[in-house]
Amino acid sequence: MGFSQGVSGLNAASDDLDVIGNNIANSETTGFKSGSVSFADIYAGSQVGLGVQVTGVTEDFSDGTPTATDNPLNVAISNSGFFRAVDSSGGVYYTRDGDFSLDDNRNLVTSTGMNVTGYPASGTPPTIQQGASPVDLSIPLTGMPASVTTTSTMAVDLDSDSTTINTTTTPFNASDSSTYSFSEPLTTYDSLGNPHNINLYFTNTGSDTWSVNAVDGSDTAGTVQNLGTMTFSTSGALLSTAPATGTQPTDTFSVNMAAVNGSASTNFSIDFAGSQQQYATTSSVTAQNQNGYSAGDMTSYAINDDGTITGTYSNNQTQLLGQIALANFANPQGLTSDGNNVWSATSTSGPAMLGTAGTGNFGTLTSDALESSNVNLSNELVNLIVAQRDYQSNAETIKAQDTIMQTLVSMD
């Protein structure tokens, strides 16, 4: 028996204790992946082994448990994938720690200050430019600009029993309710975000026909716009619309918004598809919508389960700001752990494959949550006892060898 076996056993057991201790120390570290030591025996041309060696430390990339938080910038990954982060010198790293925050420039950063990367949003309205090179993500306080109304819809249920009005003898007058049968306001927005209260007036002219007029409440001249007529079938379904002037697509009229506070005079379409004429207690509107809005300031933001970042604004609109990119590898075990909850790619791991949550071989995200460490403390404490006994047993082999050597030396 030589000392080499015992010494190698002590070294291996010491490394095992180090890894177990590191696992226990990081049992509360967000996104931490536990490790385990791999051993191999040592032979050199003899059936008598020369001891043991550590061949590597294998990380367990199984999921930790997502833990809910109250932070809208927290994100947890389930299944495969890593967040992609870039440090100040341009180095690219990968992490499972979704404890993000904003720096003084409102860039999205990791807990160690690296920039989180993803796909930008651009265009009007903004859309995610997937396939583009990842960029540093940010949540700017820039307000949302106004958007002019270009289209609108309104489904009306007109009372077939309402009094028929002869528009020749009783011309329309917005100030006289006896000259029309029903009115309904529609709020729209011009290019500067000024709201316009467009009042629509419906007049039953008989023979299942209704005339439609509009007055823009922002028009100081109170100009009346004769939009045209709506014709219904004997069963009450809308058959057609006929514009007073010009032509337009079926079921729609064109309405003018007056110039206000420096905005240009613009037109928008209003689609009455789905309208009907029925016997009812009173005429009513069953649906109404338009695509414009005023300017707004950001009031809140959120990271969604698909990784998209959206801002909510004071004009009750939301807008895409970007989308977090995920990375995956052919062999995650080949990644190099660099501390600070990050890994870097190696030739063994293969290059990073980029994508988004829930697509291909990428995992899913849980917003307002963090992935806890996957360390199982019960198992680690048992492993600690085994590693400690291993260390003590190897120490005993050295002690026994030392006793034998002393016996040999003391022989006369």
Image: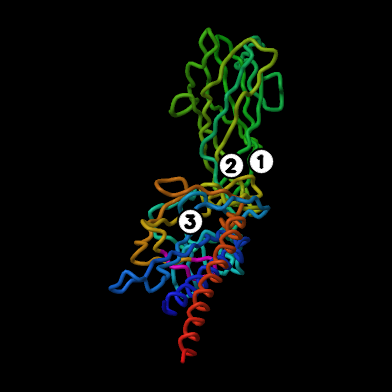
Tag 3 residue: 61
Classify 220 as above or below 398.
above
**Alpha carbon separation for disc pair 1 and 2:** 9 Å
Sequence order check, earlier mark of 1 and 3:
3
Of tags 3 and 2, the one toward the viewer is: 3
Sequence order check, earlier mark of 3 and 2:
3
Helix or strand or loop: what does disc 1 sit on? Answer: loop
| Scheme by which the image is coloured | rainbow
Quick check: 162 left or right of 52?
A: right
**Which dot marks residue 258?**
2
Total number of numbered discs in the rendering: 3
Magenta stretch encompasses residue 144 = no
Label 3: how many residues lie within 10 Å, few (<14), some (14-19) or many (20+)?
A: some
**Alpha carbon separation for disc pair 1 and 3:** 68 Å
- Give the amino acid at mark 1: Thr
The image shows residue 228 at horizontal and vertical percentages of 52, 24
Proximity of marks 1 and 2: CB atoms separated by less than 8 Å: yes
Write the start and end of the magenta stretch as one range. 335-342
The quarter holding residue 8 reads bottom left
Residue drawn at x 61%, y 57% as measured from the top left: 377
- Give the amino acid at mark 2: Ala
Front residue of 367/323: it is: 367
Tag 1 residue: 220
Proximity of marks 3 and 2: CB atoms separated by less than 8 Å: no
Quick check: 215 left or right of 390?
A: right
- Give the amino acid at mark 3: Phe
Report the residue that reaches farthest toward the top: 234
Quick check: 261 left or right of 34?
A: right
Q: Main secondary structure of the magenta part?
A: loop
Figure quadrant of the N terminus: bottom left
Magenta stretch encompasses residue 338 = yes
**Alpha carbon separation for disc pair 3 and 2:** 62 Å
